[in-house]
Amino acid sequence: MKIEVGVATDIGQVREGNEDAYLVEPPLYAVADGMGGHRGGEVASQLALETIEELFRRGKGDLAEHVQQANRAVFQRSAADRRLNGMGTTLTAASIDGETAHLVHVGDSRAYLLRAGAMRQLTEDHTLVQRMIKAGEITAAEAEVHPHRNVLIRALGNEPEVRVDLDEVGLLSGDRLLLCSDGLTSMLTEDQVQAIAEAEPSPQAAADRLVRAANRAGGIDNITVLVLDARDSEAGDGDSTPAAVSGSATPFRRPSGRTIARWATAVVLVAALLVAGLSVLRSWLDGRWYVGESNGKVAVFQGVPATVLGYDLSTVHLETDLPADDVVALPSKLYAGLAEGLNADSREDAFAIVEQMQRDLQARDLAKAPAP
Ligand code: MG
């Protein structure tokens, strides 16, 4: 089977950096969506893809083993570098072997198959809400608006071992595979994704249009889309290249706007203080949330964890009864950055982080309890 590729990635409308990464290294294709404070998300997604690419090129072991090694690489780097503690990444990859697509998947990026006017999700999200749907606790419609819909229960880099979903799909000529980060699927319904994907014969045009549509719908997250079109080898004119994206030496692409954005933020902060006065700053800060430490307890803060000219840029919104030291000492190291503040996208997101901490503490206590 011949594969024609389209790929697009974008920072979105809200985020300061693009923590998504993709890999186009025929016959291997992947999307990774990183997470973690400071530069953690970018490092995690890129490191995972670099590891997989390297192993794949050397041809040792199978794809599932490569994912384990990528997991270990991210886990070890996260443990070795204080600033990267707690970073992680999703990974959804397809390797095409003849008529078969081998899929590996961890997290909430997704693979879809478009065939003969129908679109089918090939992967299952490893999220809290997906688990609740399966347990019959909420409906799929409720999950779409659930405040904790972004909480992952599986990702690369959080534990020394990771469970990897494996799947195989037989490809037919005319099939279109979609690999995407949740920045696409959280902004567009599946019907919208399908309509756009089917309207564009060219895979590159389809990828571009999907990203544009997600941006128009709000673009609250980084958006990455890979479109893989399968065609019978005989069907084409024979000499078109397999990858629309040139087999360049730089299969990774990522806007490096984060550092600049951080400086810009600092400049904007000071300017807002001096020029527009405190009220402008206040309303900006009111939209910012993080989880930090107050009186030795985990607390939800509104604002940013900083002071400018002696002016405290955050206030305690809620002080929980979770002991901060216990949370920081969790073996996952997920919350090692608590003292500096763990960024949240929203108030709901901050509460989701706190709830996850609570569950993690419970899990730790369960593990410690003597067997009955
Ligand atoms: Mg994302």
Image (cartoon, rainbow, N blue to C red):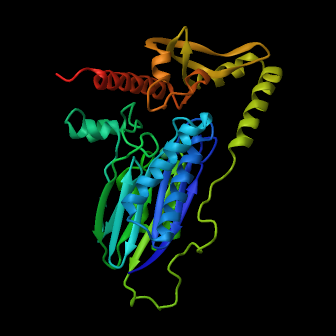
Give the image location of residue 212, x and y in percent.
54, 56
Q: Is residue 339 above or below residue 134?
A: above
Give the image location of residue 239, x and y in percent.
52, 90
Left or right: residue 168 compared with residue 71:
left
> Which residue does the image show at 30% across and 26% down from the upper left?
367
Image quarter of the C terminus = top left
| Residue 115 position by quadrant | bottom left
Mark yes or no: residue 181 visible: no
Q: Tell me how many marks there are.
A: 0
Give the image location of residue 215, x and y in percent.
54, 49
What is the residue that sits farthest to the front in this orientation?
370
The residue nearer to you, when weighing 71 against 32, is: 71
Mark yes or no: residue 25 visible: yes
Left or right: residue 202 compared with residue 340:
left
Give the image location of residue 306, x and y in percent.
69, 21
The residue nearer to you, when weighing 81 against 117, is: 81
Left or right: residue 19 compared with residue 96:
right
The residue nearer to you, when weighing 181 against 62, is: 62
Image quarter of the N terminus = bottom left
| Residue 62 position by quadrant | bottom left
Q: Is residue 210 above or below residue 364?
A: below
> Which residue does the image show at 42% across and 64% down from the upper left?
197
What is the residue that sits farthest to the top in this orientation?
295
> Which residue does the image show at 51% across and 49% down from the upper left?
73
